[in-house]
Structures are given as C-alpha cells and as structure tokens.
Amino acid sequence: MTLVATLIVGALLSVAITEPSQAEPVDDSLIIDGELQMTTRVKAPPEHPLDEILSGWLYRTPETRAMEADSFENPGMLYVEQGEDIWNQTSGALGRSCATCHGDATLSMNGVGAHYPKWHAASERPINIELRINQCRIENMAAEPYAFDSEEQKALTTYIKYQSLGQPVAIDLDAGGMRSWWGEGKNLYYRRMGQLNLACASCHENYSGRHLRADHLSQGNSNGFPTYRLKQASMVSLHNRFRGCIRDTRAEFPPAFSDELMALEVYLAWRGAGLSVETPAVRQ
Amino acid sequence: MKLSRRRALHLSAGAAVLAAIPASLLSAAAADATPADERLQQFTGGRTPLRDKITLTAPEIAENGNTVPVSIHVDSPMNRHSYVEAVTLLAPGNPNPGVITFHFTPNSGSADATTRIRLAKTQTLIAVARLNDGTVFMDEKNVKVTIGGCGG
Amino acid sequence: MATPKPRVKVPRRAAAGEIITIKTLISHKMESGRRINKQGSLVPRQIINKFRCDFNGETVFSCDIEPAIASNPYFSFKARVDAGGVFTFTWSDDNGDVYSTQKTIELTS
C-alpha cells in the first residue's frame, strides 16, 4: 500500500473509532531550542515491515510536544544535570570518576549512545549503556554496579545518551552474534503473550496511529529512552518500559537485561534506525 | 430565582457565593457548601467573581493527569493604583480542590503565571483573580483527563 | 532525587522598564501524601509549599503551593526590571529545608 493510501485508510479507521482530532501522527517538526533539527520521520529500508519510521513525539499532544522542544521546559534535563554531577563524582575503591578516564563527556561521549546496543565480545552478548556503565564501575573503578533503575543508573544513562542528541540511531548488526540476537528480538516482538494474548506488534505495528483507550499508539520506538514520562513525572528506562508493557498484557515479564529483553532492545534499535536520539524525550 | 440579584447579594456571604458560582462548582446537595465553594468564598471574601479580565489556559485533553500544563493571564495595568493581588486555581474534582495561589505585586509588570498541575479526573478547572481593591474575576476550563493504554 | 536542584532562566540583560519572563524548575518528588508505596503503606506528604522571587530584596512574585502541583515544580512568571540587580529565588520544603539560587541582571540602557 502506498504511504498516502495507508494514511487515508488509517485516518478513516481512526475516525471511525475515535474523535478525528488526534487521528494520525502530526505533521510537525521537532527543533530543539529553535536550533537543533531532529529527525522524527525516516523512510524505512526495504526489508522493514513499515513504509516510514516515526518518532513517538509525533503522536503526543501539542503541550507534550512543546515540552520536549524547549530544553528548559523539558524536566528530563534535570536528570541530565544530575547525570553530569555523577559523571564527575568519584566512586569506588580506586577513587575514580567517569571523568578520570573519559574526561569531558560532551567530547568523549559525543555520538556514543546512538550506536548502542553494541556487541560485547567478552560476555558474548549485546551490551547497552546501563550494562556498560556497570562493567566500567566493576572493572575500572572497583565500585559496586548500579541496581536496575536506581536513580544514578537512570541519570547517568540519560546524561550519556544525551550526548548523542539529534544523531541518528545506527547499530552494527554485523558485529559478533548481533544478527542472531536481532532474530530472537524479532521473534519476541511478534510473539503473542499473556492473558490478553498481545504481541508488541499487535499495538505498535498493526494499530499505531489509533487509540488504545485514550492513548494515541505510537510505533513504539526506543530512540527517546530513558524518557521523561508525565505519568511517573520522572525518567523511565527502556527495560522498565518493556517490563511494564509486557505486564500490561498480563504476561510474566522477563528480568531487566535478560536475554529476551536484550534481544528486544537490539531489534527495536533496528526498527527505529535513522531516528534522532531524543533522550531525554518527553512522553505521556 | 425568587430573590432579585441585589437582594441575594445582601444575604449571608455563603449564600451569595453560592448564587454566583457556576453550576460546575455546585454539589448535588446545593445547600451544603463544597470544599471548593468554601475555598472560593475564603478567597473572594464573599464577593461575586465576574467572568472577565482573567484567562485560564489549559489543554482540552490532558495527555496524563499527573502533569498538566496550565497558565493564567489577567488584564491589568499592574501599577500601584490597580494591580492583581492574587490568583488562585481550584480543581473541584480533586480530593483537595486547592491547587496553588499566585501572589503578584506591581513589580510583576504583568499578571501572568504558568505551572504544571495534577488532575485526578476530568473536571472544570477554575481560576479566580483578586485585585488590590477587592474586586474578583474568574475563568474556567474543562479538562478531560484520560486513562492510558492498558492502564500502562 | 538527591538534593533538590533548582534551574532558573532569567535574561542577562533588559532595558529599563522592560517586562521579562522568568522560568523556574526544581527537582522534587512532591509527595502528595496520597500515594501508596509498593509495601502498601501511605507515603507521607512532602512537598515544596512556597516559592518566592525577590528582586534586590523586594518580593516580586510568590506562590502558596499545594500537593496538586506536579513533581519537579515548574513556574513561569513576569517581572518588570527598572534597575540592574539580583533576583533571589527560594523554595521552601515541608521538612523545613529551603533551597535557593540567584541570578544577576544588567540594564542595557
């Protein structure tokens, strides 16, 4: 189906189900602070199930979109600042901070987050920013790893990802065993589960643009994580969101950083490839 | 109403406030003042707020009731002779109707304020302004508060 | 978050008599006192209950805050600048703590 035809059908379907005011993702441009042009729409590669890859930003109300477009209005920036403090704070028996080895994050971490998750040869599995931070803490700082979703883990991950703001998500699927993890992630994405018998695809591929109760369903891309969610009024990590979504289908949800969720993270990064890193994004 | 408006204003403060309050604030048992009514009366000193001068801006549909951006603007010269003393926001549908009271001074230059609030459910938000001479004005906006996705 | 951190946006310069826009944000959970935690008990109220903006020692704008103000409270308001000087911003916590920050502004003419 051509894009136009899809949009028309989609618009007709959404109008049938709900009020026309928020039928489709908006035709709006995200420019942060009037300066940084963000890519929120990307033509999908040929093997992609969708024609166009869209950022979750496009599905939000004008007020929510405005919050992300201004770095002062964006409460996620409070966590970027907290992350910067942590970056410069010594931690662990060796008395080092992130800055000790990595110096100025605006230089050393520039563009880094956009290429995660990466293949990690030593552990023979993909690694994300949260796990990389913990690996560094253990091996290079003689410090305790952060517990999943601890304030420090979220703030520091937000700060590091923020150094890639505006840059396109682009992961290397040819490294190590990434392709097979991508395959596992894809299987999970399409697997129906739980009492509600829903797969990720059920909402985010088949019904994106339509409403689930009053929630305007996006494509479920990961380019904005960790995200400032208005619901929690604080940062929400990607694995927290995975677990929450799966829990909401009334299925048992896998542990954070488990094989299933790491595979899903890899697959999702591919599904959203080309979108700008928006961390800290503002979502509902 | 049997009573003329003038007569109504001469009655006790509570009744006068009830007469002036829009239907949105009245509870089912209209004779008993709701917490929102009481707050309003406290703020207005029993005076009747007019629908003028103050504009309340709030989204028609709140993406999430936990963080709703709202702003107020009051038409006022904001000089020593005539200025907005205070603006209060009331959310009658919340467990506690009080939200915030902004205090302005002539040094504010302009009676404007923006903040982010929590709304427990769909309701009519009310903003009341009080000038230095005691006159009061109000505006209201209905905000739909929705439940997201699978409750997620 | 650890210690509530304020963020304030004030123009560096203004013309005499200009009305400027000031934006403020502070990290704070704003526990309403109605939330039930994972263990099933009510989390006690702890919010920022007052915010004040002074200019050269005189109050310009302030608010009395209740639990219906969202986490990480955001306030934007206006101030008329007739002289150069210092804006002082103060947030008062239920627990007695006071957080404060300052911004200087110069006159252009």
Image: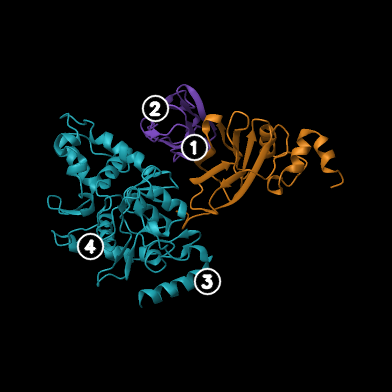
In the picture of the structure, the residue carrying the numbered disc 3 is A16
Q: Colour of chain B?
A: orange
Q: Chain of mark 1?
A: C
Q: Mark 1 highlights which residue? A: C77
User: How far is mark 1 from mark 3, CA to CA?
Assistant: 42 Å
For disc 4, the neighbor class at 10 Å (few under 14, some 14 to 19, many from 20) is: many
Chain A appears in which tint? cyan
Residue annotated with mark 2:
C101
Residue at which label 4 appears: A182
Q: Are marks 2 and 1 on the same chain?
A: yes
Q: Earlier in the sequence, mark 3 or mark 4?
A: 3
Answer with left or right where residue B134 lies relative to residue A149. Answer: right
* Of callouts 2 and 1, the N-terminal one: 1
Are discs 1 and 3 located on one and the same chain?
no
**What percent of the width, then of the height, locates residue A75?**
39, 42
Secondary structure category for the residue under label 4: helix
- Chain to which the residue tagged by mark 2 belongs: C
